[in-house]
Image (cartoon, rainbow, N blue to C red):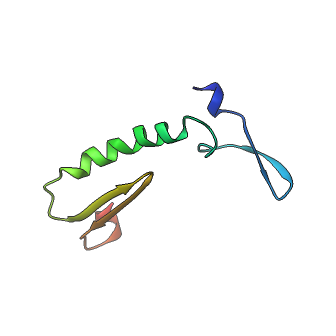
Amino acid sequence: MKLGNEELILQYDNNMYLQKRGLAMGVADSPDLANLYDVDFEDKFKNSEDPCIAFFGRFINEILAIVYAPCADEAL
């Protein structure tokens, strides 16, 4: 798994680049790794009884949460 996710080369506008962070969409294990990473957040908030969390939803690798808080720092 480590070998398949390091030293990834991508092409953009006829130039080649070494990808330094993240997973490439074309790597076979990208969807599985994204789901394993995201399930931690989903488990924390899905069953939360916190009244400040009005909505929490996930679709593929996108997470949307609506949080009631007086400021951005408290929302985080």
Question: What is the x, y in percent for residue 15?
Answer: 85, 52
Residue occupying the point 34% across, 42% down = 39
Question: What is the x, y in percent for residue 38?
Answer: 39, 45
Residue occupying the point 24% across, 70% down = 68
Q: Is residue 4 left or right of residue 14?
A: left
**Quadrant that contains the N terminus:** top right
Residue occupying the point 60% across, 26% down = 2
Identify the residue at the far bottom of this view: 70
Residue occupying the point 33% across, 47% down = 41
Question: What is the x, y in percent for residue 40?
Answer: 33, 41
Number of numbered tags placed on the structure image: 0
Q: Which of 74 and 29 is in front in this view?
A: 29
**Quadrant that contains the C terminus:** bottom left
Image height of 71 relative to 50, above or below: below
Image height of 24 relative to 62, above or below: above
Q: In this view, does 39 lie to the left or right of 48?
A: right
Image height of 20 relative to 66, above or below: above
Image height of 69 relative to 34, above or below: below
Identify the residue at the far right of this view: 14
Question: What is the x, y in percent for residue 26?
Answer: 64, 43
Q: In this view, does 70 lie to the left or right of 37?
A: left
